């Protein structure tokens, strides 16, 4: 069997020949495609630093074999800003000082986008905190993260409503 | 991670044929298996990748009123299925109290049943573990064991099964549908996991090549929808395994319990259904006295396996709380912290 996988990463189709089936999606992004924005923290699904969107859903890239996801669409932190304009979640993280060292931030932001898309938390801080509990922040920027997610939820909902009205 | 042969079947029949080879393991989401492979606690010679199968991914409402959940249904999809949640709210509460949103988005129903213990000595390949390496001993005995089993353990193994999902499932009489080289069979979930005894390496009734294809909830299980809850005590607020947990379901008519279901998690190598407690609750008036008596019956055979005597009293209290919450009625919306014992109880009851 060929060990090649074709993934659409940040809207660009990429075919990668794998020399080994053990390559995780995280290592494929970082080591084979030079997309190092997705971070390797624990590499065991415990910290959330490697969170990406896989077919629109937030997942831990460290616990997925690349070979299992031929044909999938992946969105990483590098694919968020378009034409130099930050994604609303990125902008909200800056506005609310939702980071210190920044290592967990790409995973936090991808997870927040997934959370907002799931539509279960709304603007309830308790539900946002619970929904973001798969992303650890060693600097303890949780307060700013929660505020940023709530503001981005509001911004993205307002934007969606305007687009629907237009 | 060890090297392995990678096989990609497209049908259940192909998968079963491929996995009949000794040393094979099925790969679904991989959230547990790949983690164990990275640390060397699992070393399959062959991975049979289920991600390209067609089917096994539906939540089917059956003509008899039961529900059949395909083994590849993702935890998050099941937890957020509106019809399923109306029928089995405690199952959804348990699912949403487990792992993180990222893991729930991929982890499957079949994989949840088959996840391995989180015993640190099982995971650490430098430690003796009869479950991982039969005959090597058990370093958990006499080790750091405050979270280990208080029911059903043996001298050879004191590990617990970590699943939340399985606790309400076993309370509700779920049935596991299995296909394998010798054909199809169905086993009550209660009989699916094995207690350690002399053979802790045998964790379930599955034989080589057998595949969990679905979990079925019987029609009568939906009869507890109005009064069922899952409660889980953790060492942190979220994203942690249970120290102890309980699923409770009640049917109450004219001020009397007509039927009760109770199961415990975090106490044994399998989800622990408390049938004696259920029998004692039938016909009783719902309230503190009946619930305390039921909880004592549920833990009647418990004994500490190490520094964990506290878990016996704790499990009783969590069982009482689950029964109390069930009696108060299933909330319209799950609490912000699903299954949390810190959520307030109507009427101001504590503890």
Image (tube, rainbow, N blue to C red):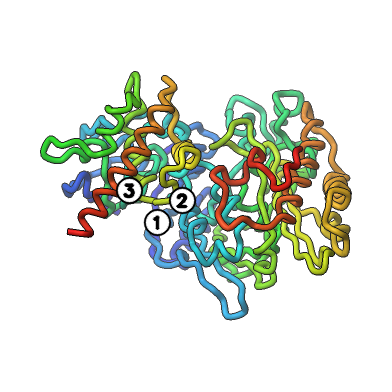
Q: Which residue is labeled 3 in the image?
A: A54
The part of the image, by quadrant, that contains residue B278 is bottom right
> Which of labels 3 and 2 is toward the front?
3
Q: Residue at x 56, y 44 (%)?
A: B98
Report if residue A23 is visible in the image. Answer: no
Left or right: A80 with respect to B192?
left
Label 2 packing within 10 angstroms: few (<14), some (14-19), many (20+): many
Q: Which residue is labeled 1 in the image?
A: B51
- Percent position of residue B285, x then y: 86, 59
The local secondary structure at tag 2 comes to: strand
The local secondary structure at tag 3 comes to: strand
Disc 3 chain ID: A
Q: Residue at x 12, y 35 (%)?
A: A84
Whether labels 1 and 2 belong to a single chain: the reply is yes
Front residue of B214 and A128: A128
- Callouts 3 and 1 close, C-beta under 8 Å: no
Q: Which residue is labeled 2 in the image?
A: B27
Disc 2 chain ID: B
- Percent position of residue B230, x then y: 66, 50
């Amino acid at each position: 069997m060929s060990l090649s996988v074709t993934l659409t990463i940040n809207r660009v189709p990429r075919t990668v020949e794998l020399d080994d089936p053990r390559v995780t999606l995280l290592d494929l992004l970082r080591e084979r495609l030079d997309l190092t924005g997705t971070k390797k923290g624990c590499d065991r699904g415990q910290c959330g630093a490697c969170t990406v969107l896989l077919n629109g859903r937030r997942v831990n890239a460290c616990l997925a074999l690349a070979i299992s996801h031929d044909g999938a669409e992946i969105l990483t932190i590098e694919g968020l800003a378009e034409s130099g304009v930050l994604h609303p979640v990125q902008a909200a993280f800056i506005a609310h000082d939702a980071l210190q060292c920044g290592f967990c931030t790409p995973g936090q932001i991808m997870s927040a986008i997934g959370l907002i898309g799931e539509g279960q938390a709304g603007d309830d801080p308790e539900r946002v905190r619970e929904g973001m509990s798969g992303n650890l922040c060693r600097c303890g920027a949780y307060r700013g993260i929660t505020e940023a997610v709530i503001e981005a939820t509001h911004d993205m909902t307002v934007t969606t409503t305007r687009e629907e009205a237009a | 991670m060890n090297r392995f042969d990678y096989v990609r079947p497209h049908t259940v029949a192909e998968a079963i044929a491929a996995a009949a080879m000794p040393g094979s393991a099925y790969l679904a989401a991989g959230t547990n298996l790949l983690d164990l492979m990275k640390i060397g606690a699992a070393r399959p010679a062959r991975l049979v990748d289920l991600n390209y199968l067609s089917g096994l991914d539906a939540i089917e409402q059956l003509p008899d009123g039961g529900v059949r959940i395909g083994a590849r249904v993702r935890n998050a999809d099941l937890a957020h299925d509106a019809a399923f949640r109306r029928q089995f709210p405690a199952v959804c509460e348990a699912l949403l109290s487990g792992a993180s949103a990222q893991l729930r988005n991929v982890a499957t129903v079949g994989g949840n049943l088959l996840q391995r213990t989180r015993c640190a000595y099982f995971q650490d390949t430098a430690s003796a573990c009869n479950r991982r390496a039969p005959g090597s001993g058990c370093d958990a005995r006499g080790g750091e064991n405050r979270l280990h089993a208080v029911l059903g353990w043996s001298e050879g193994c004191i590990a617990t099964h970590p699943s939340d999902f399985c606790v309400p499932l076993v309370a509700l009489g779920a049935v596991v549908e299995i296909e394998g080289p010798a054909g199809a069979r169905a086993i009550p979930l209660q009989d699916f996991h094995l207690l350690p005894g002399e053979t802790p390496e045998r964790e379930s009734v599955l034989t080589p090549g057998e595949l969990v294809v679905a979990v079925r909830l019987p029609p009568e299980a939906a009869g507890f929808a109005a009064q069922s809850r899952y409660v889980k005590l953790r060492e942190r607020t979220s994203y942690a395994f249970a120290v102890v947990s309980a699923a409770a379901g009640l049917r109450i008519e004219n001020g009397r319990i007509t039927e009760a279901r109770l199961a415990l998690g975090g106490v044994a190598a399998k989800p622990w259904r408390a049938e004696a407690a259920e029998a004692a609750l039938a016909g009783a008036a719902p309230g503190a006295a009946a619930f305390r008596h039921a909880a004592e019956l549920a833990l009647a055979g418990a004994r500490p396996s190490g520094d964990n005597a506290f878990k016996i009293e704790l499990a009783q209290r969590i069982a009482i709380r689950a029964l109390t919450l069930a009696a108060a009625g299933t909330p319209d919306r799950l609490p912000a912290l699903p299954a949390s014992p810190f959520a307030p109880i109507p009427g101001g009851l504590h503890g």
